[in-house]
Amino acid sequence: MFTSVAAMFIVVIIVAPLRRGVRPLRIWLVQTLGSVFLLLSLFATALNPSLGPLRYSDITYFSGYACLIVWLALLSRRVGGRADPTTFLDTAAVCSGAALAIWTVAVTPMLGGTQLPATLVWAVYPTVDALLLALAGHLAYRLGNPVPAMTWIIGSLVLLLLVDLVNSLVAISSATGEHAVVTGWYMFFFFGLAAAASHPSVPRLAHRPAPGERSTTGQRRTALIVLTISPVLVSTLVPVGGWIDTVVRVTLVTLLLGLLFLRLSVTMLALSKAESDSHYRATHDQLTGLLNRAEMFNELEQRLVNNAAAGRSTAVLFLDCDDFKYINDTWGHGAGDTLLRDIASRLPRRLGPEPLLARQGGDEFVVVCAVDGLAEAVALARLVRSFFDEPVRIMTNRTHTVTPSIGIALAEPGETVTAEALVGRADVAMYEAKTAGRGRYVVFDDDLARRSRMKSAVADRIGEALRQEAFSLVLQPIMAGADYATIIGWEALARWHDPDLGEVSPAEFIPLAEQHGFINELGEFVLRQACRELALLRELFRLSDVSMFVNVSPAQLLQPDFVDVVRRALESAGLPPDALWLEVTETLLVDKGPEVTTTLVTLREAGVHLCIDDFGTGYASLSRIMQLPVDCVKIDSFLVARVGEDTTAQRQLGAVIDLVRSLGIEHVVAEGVETSAQEAAVRQLGCPMIQGFLYGRPKTAQAMLAARGMVLDDLEDDPLPTGGVSGARRA
Ligand code: C2E
Ligand code: CA
Ligand code: CA
């Protein structure tokens, strides 16, 4: 009856996991084989022939156990990767402990008797059980969160260990073989394994846990202590019986202590390695292995002190790769990472061990070096830049040459400056280098310091200035006709007077307003004010067809309701749409999306004119320009500046004017005309319109009215007249 019930359970143990779809099969086939051996053992037990002290059933049982040991070891390796030495040491210690306990309790009394060989065979069972239990415990530890199938397995193995212990004691002492009552308990072992095998969680025995799901090492440690210390205690309680017993016990205890000692050393080693690993991770950048930002500041702080003590200066180079975003966007982040790693390995190879290298984040690197003055720092920057000349293989079939923009900041020995401030200065200088073009270096000096202070002051004040209406407009005439004598319109240029900062130039505040999100508000103010002033000037000067040219920033064109903003400005001033010319820079056309085109087309359809500003400075392709409804092109002053003195410049300007006209654009404005020589040259090249200081500096509307003998009481606050001249009176 025992045999048939146990056989039924074993069949479940074999079949159920396969039906639950466990993977990988090769591991589970080992378990299947082990179970087949157990099944065979049942029949062998029933027949029970023997080879001396070793019965057939012992052979099949040991084979079955061996398979289960391999199975658990394979699962454990699959779940936790390669076994670390602690697995081996723990298992060996638990087995030695079990062997010691069993030797002391079961074998010692038999020493000298005829039953010794059979006793030894019996003693193997609990020892192997202990080994299985140790392996199962290890697997459970690696699985982390409790898996019910695992709990069943461990429960079964604990039971097996107990039953085998009792069984071997009974068998040894009675010398009559197994006791039927005790044997019955094996059924519960098979039942437990069958429950594990048929539990839905059984496939999880081979699943790696998610990180952080590991259980604590506490249970593992407790189990290890109990399983190794208790056999030693037991062994001290039972009196020693002869020299063989002494030798075996001393050997086992020594082995156990040796294993525990090794275990301790391995743990300590792992601990100190983990500690140094985590320190490395906390101080180094993962991608490049260079120092990270935080550690760079710590190190730099230290070097500032040491270099100053040695009477040397500390140079900080702040590097930023030009067009890194382009690489990421075009070839993917993998290519970007490769590039960064390549740079990170190049720098220390060429610079040697002395300079401090760190990745500041993104595509930014910092180099810190002790130098004997600015010249040496600049030489270092040149050297660093030259490292970038060699192309980087960013993909198997593509190389790329990247240039760095470098900012240089120097701390003299006597100077007290924090690491953070010094890197901040180098950063400001780097930004300046980037603005000036690619692949340059800039030294942080007093002038840059002043400008950078100004910049942060401006950025701080801009929002308030808008609320307090500190912005105003000046108008610059645009001339046309024979001798360029006719004003056809004005360009509205924003002005900001700050009580503390004084006059702030638009070249300074427009980019900052763009960066800090004020450009839409500022742009709307400019549009409304420009329209009002044009309405007034048309009225007072009785010029019905002069126009207003207003600069528009890219961010404004991305604003979804920009078309309405323009419409409202025109309507509230009572102007027709064709009185307004919007100027957008050429660069805008290069990298903005289809929304911008849609907005421009809608405005154009509403009757507003469009102008390309600063033509000749950007990279817009002709095809892009031809796609847009452009009415006017303003040629940048840098193309006009040398005209009149230099024939090459004149030829270039001529070519540009011809090019624009060949696109069918009749309104071409030459900007920045300052001298009559330039004017004559521009006229000779057939440019129809002109603008520049030669025809007057930009002026406020009030100043223009005053020049004609008119006084305007309050241009800013008054709702502007659409039919009368109520805002102005003859002086
Ligand atoms: P821009 O649109 O190219 O404006 C022309 C700039 O050149 C103005 O400088 C003007 O005063 C200056 N200029 C005019 N004629 C001459 C000349 O003969 N010689 C020289 N050397 N300069 C001349 P400003 O007013 O400082 O404006 C600088 C830039 O700021 C403008 O360049 C424009 O891009 C931007 N800006 C000005 N007002 C606004 C605005 O309301 N909105 C936006 N988005 N940008 C504006
Ligand atoms: Ca302009
Ligand atoms: Ca311009």
Image (cartoon, rainbow, N blue to C red):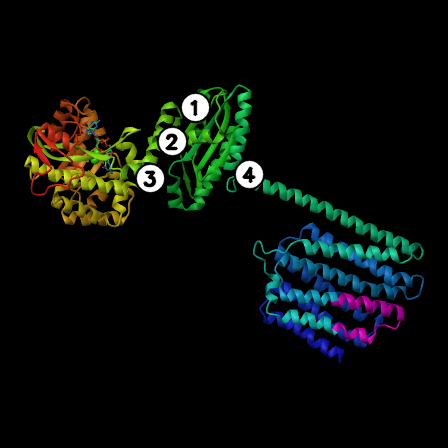
Q: Where does label 4 land, which residue? A: 283
CA separation in Å, label 1 and label 4: 28 Å
Q: What element carries label 4?
A: helix
Q: What element carries label 2?
A: loop
Q: Which amino acid does label 2 sit on?
A: Gly
- Which mark, by number, is residue 515? 3
Looking at marks 1 and 2 on the same chain, the residue that comes earlier in the sequence is marked by 1
Magenta span: 159-186
Residue 343 horizontal/vertical position (percent): 47, 36
Looking at marks 3 and 2 on the same chain, the residue that comes earlier in the sequence is marked by 2
Q: Which amino acid does label 4 sit on?
A: Thr
Crowd around label 3: few <14 · some 14–19 · many ≥20 (10 Å): few
Looking at marks 2 and 4 on the same chain, the residue that comes earlier in the sequence is marked by 4
Looking at marks 1 and 4 on the same chain, the residue that comes earlier in the sequence is marked by 4
Q: Where does label 1 land, which residue? A: 378
Q: Where does label 2 land, which residue? A: 439
Quadrant that contains the N terminus: bottom right
| Residue depth check, mark 4 versus mark 3: number of the one nearer the observer | 3
